[in-house]
Image (cartoon, rainbow, N blue to C red):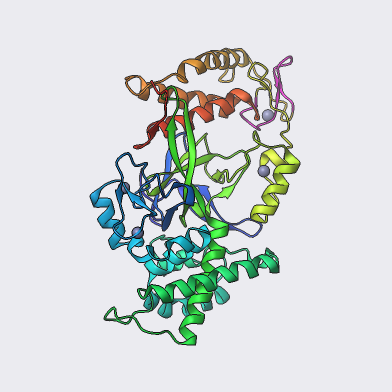
């Protein structure tokens, strides 16, 4: 991946842009191929959910087979001595005592962790400046540093993530405010947050408490709008039979720049302390690159899907699947050919485009008959590609074939199409499968 100079962690295929109706979003600077890796970002914060603190390492989030305990509490485990040392010197060492309360609400845990890793001195120096910036800088520039670079490791980028506070109702805001008060109380009790330059704890005055409490509240709101799931890849009976299990949540500012689509052009995986985004299908230069926050159009019908997105993320979805009301998908055998000139449907009987009236002959670059044959051939190969295994030397070869099949559908088949969706799903599974870490479930062969 060739890195971008303006979005740290992203590929140079991506650019940041601002659209008044959508806010900030990511577009393709050049044509992108299916499977191309677009982002590898270290998360600002990642944590396990309550159900997985007893099964997964609190430092690296890996599934533990021979756990090493915390010397002080009985809540968490580590996968190895180095992970335990890292955890005790880092986030767990600062939250061990407070964990029974923090685990009751992931928003609290995240907010507490973010403040602890930022430190009180930095919050005191920076937050008043950032609050002023939020009022005075244009929305398109918020979060960019003085060199116009979007850098997750800069606290400014993290701070300026959207909160959706204006769209949230008062009772909800009040409930999150109560959590922020609790976080502040736990920060005081930790005696590790309100410390002077020499690291000695002091009793904070009202001004310090107010600043930390309101910053905790701000982080809770940004986390609610921007968090992503962290999953564990679980191999079922065969290597390509991969399921993902939710094990926690993370916050990654560059990942947050991607907008939702019910028919996304990319997908992300977050399971090794960082997030990775790869393209699912071809994206043309200038087009927006989208992810699916859930649900995708294949998972829920239009009306409940739009209602869910409105409720959870406060936006009205206008992706191509929603605006085009893709309630039924053309089956694998009944595909509609797309005119490569204008994207409309080709009339197979007259071999002409229904919109631009282009007529397709038999010998030019767009031979309808030949395309049909290629599509049928590709569909016949899907079962074989679904059965790849790690010991199979053809993995890379198969991946290249899969990518070229998706490109063929991208170019000539009008979405939505079942085989096209199946191929994209298979590409996701290839990426899950080549993940460095996965758990083999009972029955794995
Ligand atoms: Zn570990
Ligand atoms: Zn502990
Ligand atoms: Zn949609
Ligand atoms: Zn046309």
Ligand 3 falls in which quarter? top right
User: Would residue 337 be seen by someone viewing this image from the given angle?
Assistant: yes
Front one among 139 and 165: 165
Residue 179 in the image: x percent, y percent? 55, 68
Q: Horizontal placement of 373 versus 170: left or right? A: left
Front one among 238 and 425: 238
Residue at the (51%, 40%) spot, across then down: 266
Is most of the magenta stretch helix, strand or loop?
loop
Front one among 150 and 305: 305
User: Would residue 145 be seen by someone viewing this image from the given angle?
Assistant: no
Residue at the (57%, 76%) spot, across then down: 135
Residue 367 sits in which quadrant? top right
Residue at the (60%, 47%) spot, across then down: 260
Residue 134 in the image: x percent, y percent? 55, 73
Q: Is residue 248 magenta?
A: no
Q: Is residue 339 magenta?
A: yes
Q: Quadrant of the N terminus?
A: top left
Q: Horizontal placement of 420 versus 356: left or right? A: left
Image: magenta residue range = 338-354
Mark count = 0
Q: Quadrant of the C terminus?
A: top left
Residue 287 in the image: x percent, y percent? 56, 44
Q: Is 263 above or below relative to 95?
A: above
Residue 352 in the image: x percent, y percent? 71, 21
């Amino acid at each position: 991946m060739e890195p971008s100079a303006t979005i740290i962690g992203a590929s140079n295929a991506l650019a940041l842009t601002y659209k008044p109706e959508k806010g900030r979003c990511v577009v393709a600077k050049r044509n992108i191929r299916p499977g191309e890796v677009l982002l590898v970002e270290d998360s600002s914060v990642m944590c396990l959910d309550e159900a997985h603190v007893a099964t997964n390492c609190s430092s690296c989030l890996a599934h533990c087979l021979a756990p090493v305990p915390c010397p002080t509490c009985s809540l968490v485990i580590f996968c190895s001595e180095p992970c335990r040392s890292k955890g005790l010197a880092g986030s767990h060492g600062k939250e061990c005592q407070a964990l029974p309360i923090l685990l009751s609400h992931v928003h609290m845990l995240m907010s507490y962790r973010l403040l602890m890793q930022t430190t009180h001195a930095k919050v005191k120096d920076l937050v008043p400046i950032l609050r002023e910036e939020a009022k005075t800088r244009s929305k398109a520039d918020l979060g960019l540093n003085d060199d116009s670079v979007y850098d997750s490791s800069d606290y400014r980028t993290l701070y300026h993530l959207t909160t959706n506070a204006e769209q949230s109702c008062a009772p909800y805001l009040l409930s999150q405010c109560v959590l922020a008060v609790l976080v502040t109380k736990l920060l005081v009790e930790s005696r590790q947050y309100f410390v002077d330059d020499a690291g000695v704890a002091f009793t904070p005055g009202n001004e310090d408490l107010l600043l930390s409490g309101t910053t905790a509240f701000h982080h809770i709101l940004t986390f609610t709008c921007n968090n992503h799931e962290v999953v564990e890849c679980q191999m079922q009976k065969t290597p390509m039979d991969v399921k993902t299990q939710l094990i926690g949540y993370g916050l990654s500012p560059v990942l947050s720049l991607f907008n939702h689509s019910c028919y996304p052009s990319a997908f992300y995986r977050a399971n090794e302390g960082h997030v990775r985004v790869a393209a699912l299908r071809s994206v043309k230069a200038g087009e927006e690159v989208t992810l699916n926050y859930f649900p995708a159009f294949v998972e829920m019908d239009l009306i409940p899907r739009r209602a869910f997105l409105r409720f959870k993320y406060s936006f009205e979805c206008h992706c191509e699947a929603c605006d085009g009301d893709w309630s039924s998908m053309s089956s694998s055998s009944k595909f509609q050919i797309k005119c490569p000139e204008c994207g409309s449907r080709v009339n197979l009987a007259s071999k002409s485009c229904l919109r631009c009236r282009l007529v397709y002959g038999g010998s030019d670059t767009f031979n309808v008959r030949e395309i049909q044959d290629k599509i049928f051939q590709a569909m016949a190969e899907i079962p074989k590609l679904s059965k790849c295994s790690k010991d199979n030397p053809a993995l890379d070869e198969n991946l290249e074939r899969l990518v070229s099949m998706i490109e063929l559908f991208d170019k000539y088949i009008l979405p939505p199409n079942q085989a096209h969706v199946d191929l994209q799903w298979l590409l996701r599974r290839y990426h899950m499968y080549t993940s460095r870490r996965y758990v083999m479930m009972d029955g794995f062969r």
